[in-house]
Amino acid sequence: MNVYAGVKRMYRDMTGASAREARDWLLMRESRIKALEELIYLREMAIQNEQASSRKIQSDYEIRLKYREDTVLEREARISDLEENVIALEELINLREMAIQNEQATTRKIQSDYEIRLKYREDTVLEREARISDLEENVIALERKAREFCAGMPQVEVDFGRFSRASPQDRALMAWQAADGWCTREKALWLAHLVESRHVTRALEIGVHGGKSLLPIAAVISAWDGVTFGVEPWSPDIAVAEPTTGANDDYWRNLDYNLVKSRFHVAGLKLGLTRHIRMLEISSDQARLALADQRFDLIHLDGSHAPDQALRDIIGWSALLSESGVLVVDDIDWPTLAEGRAYLARHFLALDEFREAGGASYGAYLLRDKPA
Ligand SMILES: C[S@@+](CC[C@H](N)C(=O)[O-])C[C@H]1O[C@@H](n2cnc3c(N)ncnc32)[C@H](O)[C@@H]1O
């Protein structure tokens, strides 16, 4: 007998139900049990679902939590990065500020140094100006005194007021009259014209003697504040160092050079020209070395007429002519100047050549090509 038959029997025994009723009762029980099992199953499923969904929610939360935690960590790392950056930038700014402060201090120091130096320069310039004006006053006073002192000397008197107001030609003539020497009146006026027409500001003469040609040149140049250099050793040893002709050499050997020299200075003082004259009391050759870096608008050669010296003078001094400088050569007709004249003909253009009735000869020349 199976379980169902046994249960049916028990039910019939207990309730007195028929076999049919027992069978229906059993079927009903079975279906209720099934329903309950279904219910249980469904509940279980529901519980499982709930568990699954709560696990899902939990895991979602965990993921989100994890994400949040990661984000927080990232943020913290970023914050710490940024904090480091801020510190580094603050340090940089501090350093820049210090550098700027240093720079400002240096600039202030430099500026104050410059101000001190500028002040010193200004003071120096003022001192120099005061000294210059003192010296100028001294020179004027000394010139006046010297003119008074020389007034008694047996020389042509100079009306200084008239001289300073005169035209260049008249000034040259008055200077020519006041000086001793060899230059003719015509030559002095011609030289004055040359100086004036070429607006010579720097002239030089070799062989000044008593200034009869140099002072007319200086008289014209002084009108525009130029300067005239004179080279004159006033020495017999130099004057006859190289022979010319017997009579000529005798003359220069026996001359009272001190007298010539002092009369030249007196004439210069009387004319008020000393500020415009620079004298070099040395030979032509020595002067050429001393003045090698200077340039002149007019050079008048009237020193030694010995052949070699005259040629040396023409070649050497022409190198010191300025761009359009003019070379004036005295006594071009002297036989001792033959070589010099030949050199002039080869390298110069003759501007003017004069031969006076009394024997004076001179010319003005422009360099055609500057010798290398
Ligand atoms: C003819 S005089 C000059 C005249 C002057 N230029 C005038 O017109 O009255 C020549 C001068 O050249 C000077 N002399 C001679 N040899 C010289 C030299 N080697 N260097 C410079 N001057 C020299 C003499 O002492 C002399 O006073």
Image (cartoon, rainbow, N blue to C red):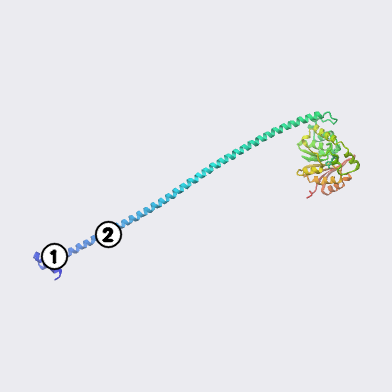
Residue ID for mark 1: 25
Q: Is residue 122 visible?
A: yes
Q: Nearer the viewer, residue 77 or 215?
A: 77
Residue in view at x 45 percent, y 48 percent:
84
Residue ID for mark 2: 49
The amino acid sitting under disc 2 is Asn
Q: Residues within 10 Å of mark 1 (few under 14, many from 20)?
A: some
Q: Quadrant of residue 310?
A: top right
The disc label shown at residue 80, or none: none
The amino acid sitting under disc 1 is Trp
Q: Quadrant of residue 24?
A: bottom left
> As drawn, which residue projects farthest toward the left?
16
Residue 26, given in percent of the width and then of the height, sits at 14, 66
Residue 319, given in percent of the width and then of the height, sits at 79, 46
Q: Quadrant of residue 354?
A: top right
Q: Element type at marker 1?
A: helix
Residue 331, given in percent of the width and then of the height, sits at 87, 42
